[in-house]
């Protein structure tokens, strides 16, 4: 009997230790998960959904749009997340072109907020979110009831200010269409959501490449969703545009082919000239024009200032 008890202890003690560790991990995971999006998740009422989401948004350390944290929120519909994604796409991942935060309809976060009146109509609802910026501003938050509770599907800004989720404007891009002249490009217009920096918006959309509809219409380009983030910066000095790219050579290695390089440069140059009165465009990869022009098999010359780095530093 004594031998049997010792064997049992050897099994029991490690088992108890594993159970203790698992309990600690579960508690930590649950606490961490809850902190991320204002859990525990309670969406029994539209008011509670709005209060919980905006409490999390206001207290978030950093910018939920820049970090992408809003994408994982259990309080937003997938359609609203896609709308926000599209706004960020137009303005660039650094949001430099964004006029104001489309979730709070302001540049800065409010000092505080409170829930105002609400109205429920079947499986839809509107809740007033009253934000304090030193003066009160009221947003009308639209919600829809799903299987997992009430979710936010629209943010309405107060008049006369209009939410970038609602406003539509036109933007122009330039793509090739298979012409024998590789430098020839064609103007394409798109209706997009609100933007405040037209040039940056146009370039960010250009680097996503043509849509399926535009492809069917004959548009061709080296640009695609794989190249959506290649723009690092653009500056214009004395009618010269200086465009700096992230290194795209492995993403589109065939860009160095003769016709492909001409098409690449013409599409970018055409789009820029549509918005700015410039004489020429000089390109660089990670701040180095020589890297760009050597890859494109053009080399350094007077047209590109002999690949001087000065304007990219």
Image (cartoon, helix red, strand yellow):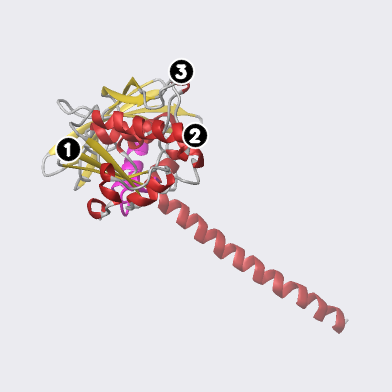
Residue 300 seen from this side: yes
The residue most toward the left is 135
Mark 3: which secondary structure?
loop
Residue labelled with disc 1: 239
> Which is more N-terminal, label 1 or label 3?
3
- The residue at the point 46 percent across, 46 percent down is 249
Marks 3/1: CA–CA distance: 32 Å
Marks 1/2: CA–CA distance: 55 Å
User: In the image, is 192 to the left or to the right of 69?
Assistant: left
Please name which of the two marks, 3 or 2, marks the residue nearer to the observer.
3
* Number of numbered markers: 3
Residues 187 and 13: in front is 187
Disc marking residue 218: 3
Q: Residue 183: where, in percent of width, then height?
A: 37, 27
- The residue at the point 42 percent across, 29 percent down is 79
Disc marking residue 148: 2
Residue 97 lies in what quarter of the image? top left
Residues 30 and 189: in front is 189
Disc marking residue 146: none
Q: Residue 282: where, in percent of width, then height?
A: 28, 42
> Which is more N-terminal, label 2 or label 3?
2
Mark 1: which secondary structure?
loop
Magenta residues span: 47-68
């Amino acid at each position: 009997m004594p031998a049997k008890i010792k064997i049992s202890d050897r099994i029991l003690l490690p088992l108890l230790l594993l159970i203790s560790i698992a309990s600690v991990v579960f508690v930590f995971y649950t606490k961490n998960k809850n902190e991320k999006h204002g859990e525990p998740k309670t969406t029994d009422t539209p008011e509670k959904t709005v209060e919980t989401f905006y409490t999390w948004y206001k207290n978030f350390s950093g910018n939920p749009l820049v970090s992408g944290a809003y994408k994982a929120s259990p309080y937003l519909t997938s359609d609203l997340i896609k709308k926000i994604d599209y706004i960020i796409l137009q303005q660039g991942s650094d949001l430099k072109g964004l006029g104001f935060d489309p979730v709070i309809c302001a540049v800065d976060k409010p000092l505080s907020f409170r829930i105002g009146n609400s109205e429920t109509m079947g499986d839809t609802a509107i809740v007033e979110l009253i934000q304090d910026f030193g003066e009160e501003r009221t947003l009308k938050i639209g919600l829809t009831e799903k299987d997992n509770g009430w979710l936010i599907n629209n943010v309405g800004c107060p008049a006369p200010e209009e939410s970038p989720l609602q406003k539509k404007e036109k933007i122009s891009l330039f793509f090739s269409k298979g012409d024998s002249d590789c430098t020839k490009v064609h103007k394409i217009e798109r209706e997009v959501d609100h933007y405040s920096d037209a040039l940056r918006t146009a370039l960010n959309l250009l680097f996503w490449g043509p849509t399926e509809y535009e492809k069917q219409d004959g548009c061709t380009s080296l640009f695609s969703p794989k190249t959506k983030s290649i723009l690092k910066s653009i500056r214009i000095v004395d009618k010269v545009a200086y465009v700096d790219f992230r290194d795209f050579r492995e993403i589109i290695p065939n860009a160095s082919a003769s016709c492909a390089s001409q098409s690449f440069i013409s599409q970018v140059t055409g789009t820029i000239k549509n918005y700015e009165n410039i004489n020429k465009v000089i390109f660089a990869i990670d701040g180095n024009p020589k890297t760009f022009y050597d890859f494109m098999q053009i080399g350094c010359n007077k047209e590109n200032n002999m690949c001087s780095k000065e304007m990219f530093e």
